[in-house]
Image (tube, rainbow, N blue to C red):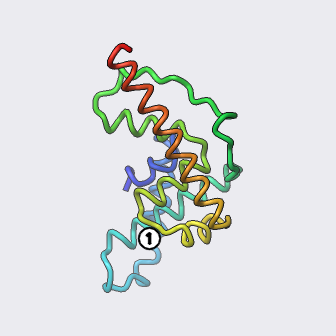
Amino acid sequence: MLGCCRHYIKDLQFAEDVMITAFHKAFLNINTYEPYGSFEGWLRRIMVRDCISYLRIQKNKFNTVEIQDYHIKQPVFDTFSSEADTIQYLVDLLPIGCKTVFNLYVIEGYKHREIAEVLNISVGTSKSQLSHAKKLLKTQLVNLKTRQNGT
């Protein structure tokens, strides 16, 4: 579940705090769990919602950012131990709105309508945030490949 929280919260210590809070909430409400679905899915949904609540409390607004106005820092890729670490780092560099929508859509499998309800945004905003996230990640991956090939 820590991995689930890390998808949304960049700082490991804060992700751990949210995870512990979500576990506490799950244990307090264990009597509401109905065994029709998987326990892991029920628990994961609590984790995701607590991560989103944390982000709201931190006053991170879900604003759209024009791609030409946003420049991602060039990461140092030599320090990563695996491709997964590199990809997680690139996702962490995304603006918070793009990152949250990207995680909900790609990793958690939410539909745009569900994302709009959870984040209190329009469906169009959800779609545009996902599009921005994909473009930013693609740009970074192309830059990485170019730097690795030495061209």
The answer to whether residue 42 is visible is yes
Image location (x, y in percent) of residue 36: 32, 86
10 Å crowding of disc 1: few (<14), some (14-19), many (20+):
some
Residue 90, compared with residue 58, is above or below; it is above
Image location (x, y in percent) of residue 64: 68, 49
User: Which residue carries the number 1 mark?
Assistant: 26
Q: Nearer the viewer, residue 32 or 143?
A: 143
Numbered marks: total = 1
Three-letter residue code for mark 1? Ala
Q: Nearer the viewer, residue 36 or 112?
A: 112
Residue 104, compared with residue 143, is above or below; it is below
Please tell me in which quadrant of the rendered image residue 128 appears: bottom right
Q: Point out the image quarter for the C terminus.
A: top left
In this image, 30 relative to 125: left or right? Answer: left
Residue 80, compared with residue 87, is above or below; it is above
Residue 8, compared with residue 135, is above or below; it is below
SS class, disc 1: helix
Question: What residue occupies the far front of the structure in this picture?
Answer: 151
In this image, 52 relative to 109: left or right? Answer: right
> What residue sits 56% from the left and 66% below the top?
115
